[in-house]
């Protein structure tokens, strides 16, 4: 099967685009996503990637699912499957949370994607 000149050109361009996309994905995956997040505010829109810095006021665990819900400076932070993360957080710790703004039962919350999105910057004490 022989390709015409236009077909060869199209295949080369397609291959180049695939390579560029692969390299871009590889480069971006090495970055901490918090570099792309905005500082959380009451005006942050649903779906926005945000960073919230503040004091942990409460730590609650759901009755099923192994989820954790934090209150960080008055903002709810939902950590799906958080029990598996073995977090060593305590009330009054200062945390930096990266997550996505969402609504649950009409209330705003930040949903954490992975353990690395939770950083304790100052331990209680």
Image (cartoon, rainbow, N blue to C red):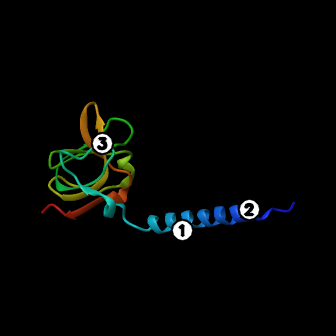
Q: Name the spot of residue 70 as percent of width and height, x first.
A: 23, 46
59 up-or-down from 16: above or below: above
96 sits to left or right of 8: left
Q: Name the spot of residue 103 as percent of width and height, x first.
A: 29, 37
Sequence-earlier tag: 3 or 2: 2
Residue mark closest to the camera, 3 vs 2: 2
Residue to which mark 2 is pinned: 6
Name the residue nearer the viewer: 11 or 49: 11
1 sits to left or right of 43: right
From the image, which quarter does the C terminus lie in? bottom left
Residue shown at 22%/52% (left/top)? 40
Helix, strand or loop status at disc 3: loop
Q: Quadrant of residue 23?
A: bottom right
Label 3 to label 2, Cα distance in Å?
45 Å
Sequence-earlier tag: 3 or 1: 1
Residue shown at 74%/62% (left/top)? 6
Sequence-earlier tag: 2 or 1: 2
- As drawn, the label of residue 46 is 3
Label 2 to label 1, Cα distance in Å?
26 Å
Residue to which mark 1 is pinned: 23
């Amino acid at each position: 099967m022989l390709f015409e000149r236009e077909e060869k050109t199209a295949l080369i361009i397609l291959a180049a685009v695939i390579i560029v996309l692969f390299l871009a994905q590889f480069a971006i995956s090495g970055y901490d996503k918090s570099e792309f997040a905005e500082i959380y505010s009451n005006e942050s829109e649903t779906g926005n990637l945000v960073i919230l810095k503040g004091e942990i006021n409460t730590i609650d665990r759901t009755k099923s699912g192994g989820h954790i819900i934090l209150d960080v400076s008055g903002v709810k932070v939902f950590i799906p499957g958080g029990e598996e993360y073995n977090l060593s957080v305590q009330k009054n710790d200062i945390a930096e949370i990266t997550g996505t703004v969402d609504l649950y039962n009409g209330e705003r919350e930040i949903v954490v994607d992975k353990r690395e999105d939770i950083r304790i910057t100052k331990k209680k004490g």
